Image (cartoon, helix red, strand yellow):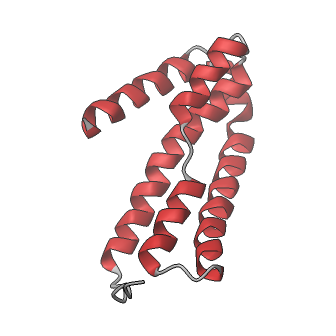
Amino acid sequence: MKNGSLVALLIFIVAGVSGNASYFVDYIGVVLLAVFLHDTVALALGYFCGAVTGLNEYSRRAVSFEVGIRNAGLGLGLVFTFFDGLGGMAIVAGWWGIWDIVAGLALATVWSKRRTRKAVPA
């Protein structure tokens, strides 16, 4: 199921971006920077909010992913359903999907290599 959902998301992203190639070329620099900064802030905010509220390390990581990773497939669906596939919006949602996969996998890999303290039962 995991591989099938990844393939479906990538097909959705490629379809959205390929139909709006001129927007992609015109605005890719701004879009890359905006999505990178937004995801970085969102992942950090989720993690540090978990820390401030006293959550254990595993819960902090879960909150970080929940806050930092959004549903790009849903975003593309909304763009094409309610906004007639406006090019700039499709490019942002498409790149967000790609970047969420890259950032999520990178962060999960880093965290999988770090040992955590055992959670104390409540």
Residue pushed farthest front?
122
The residue positioned 33% from the left and 87% from the top of the image is: 118
One can see residue 85 in this view: no
Identify the residue shown where x is 39% and y is 64%. Answer: 108
Location of residue 2 (image quadrant): top left
Taking depth in this image into account, of 88 and 69 the one nearest to the observer is 69
Q: Is residue 65 above or below residue 79?
A: below
Picture quadrant where residue 40 is located? bottom right
- State which quarter of the image contains the C terminus: bottom left
Q: Is residue 30 above or below residue 51?
A: above
Q: In this view, does 35 lie above or below 58?
A: above
- Quadrant including the N terminus: top left
> Hey, which residue is sitting farthest top in the picture?
84
Nearest the viewer among 33 and 26 is 33
Q: Quadrant of residue 17?
A: top right
Q: Is residue 73 above or below residue 33?
A: above
Q: In this view, does 7 lie to the left or right of 21?
A: left
Identify the residue shown where x is 60% and y is 56%.
Answer: 67
Q: Position of residue 66 (x, y in %)?
A: 53, 55
Residue 73 is left or right of residue 42, and the answer is left
* Residue 94 percent location from the top left of the image: 57, 32
26 or 114: nearer the viewer: 114
Q: Where is residue 45 in the image (x, y as percent from the top left)?
A: 66, 67
Q: In this view, does 38 lie to the left or right of 59?
A: right
Residue at the image point whose x is 65% and y is 81% from the top: 52
How many numbered circles are shown? 0
How far across and how far down the image is residue 46, in percent?
61, 66
Q: Say whether residue 101 is visible.
A: yes
Report the front residue among 27 and 82: 82
